[in-house]
Image (tube, helix red, strand yellow):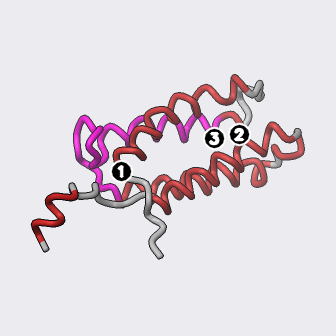
Amino acid sequence: MRLQIIPPNVHAAIDYAAAPALVAAPKLLRLEPDSAAARAPRLAGGLLGLLTPVTDTPLAARRWIPMRAHLAVDALTGVAVAAVPWVTGQRRRGVRYWLPHALVGANEIGMALMTRREQPRRRLRRLLRR
């Protein structure tokens, strides 16, 4: 059974929306601005905003980074964002300091696992190649 059900162009569209949302999340959640819990999503959003336009997807400005590398970075970023509240002790400050991080981390890891590495071919092309 293949888990890769998300096409790269859909992944890219989600990334374009998620990058500014991650950068704005600490302010929306009213996290202390200089805390590690606030810096982690900002860094993840910034990295996402830098990588997405140069990843090999139909929505990219330049296609410098292979999708496989982008997905690996997404998975590692998800692990890092989810781990920050526990590693730094920020989780003791309340649910708003750890729950969003856990959800964002799980989402990043899940998206990395479920995204196809190549754009699906059009149906006609697939039929002609058989």
| Residue lying at the far left of the rendered structure | 128
In the drawing, does residue 53 fall left or right of residue 41? left
Q: Which residue is mark 1?
A: 8
Percent x, y of residue 130: 13, 74
Find numbered disc 1 in the image and state the secondary structure of the residue it sits on: helix
Measured Cα–Cα span from mark 2 to mark 1: 31 Å
Magenta stretch bounds? 39-67
Measured Cα–Cα span from mark 1 to mark 3: 25 Å
- Residue 43 in magenta stretch: yes
Q: Which residue is rendered at x = 77% and y = 45% of the image? A: 99
Position of 21 relative to 69 (above/below): above
Q: Which residue is mark 2?
A: 36
In the drawing, does residue 46 fall left or right of residue 78? left
The number of numbered discs placed on residues in the rendered structure image is 3
User: What amino acid is found at the position of numbered circle 2 in the picture?
Assistant: Ala
Percent x, y of residue 38: 69, 34
Find numbered disc 2 in the image and state the secondary structure of the residue it sits on: helix
Position of 45 relative to 33 (above/below): below
Cβ–Cβ below 8 Å for labels 2 and 3? yes
Measured Cα–Cα span from mark 2 to mark 3: 6 Å
Q: Which residue is rendered at x = 29% and y = 46% of the image? A: 57
N-terminal of the two: label 1 or label 3?
Answer: 1
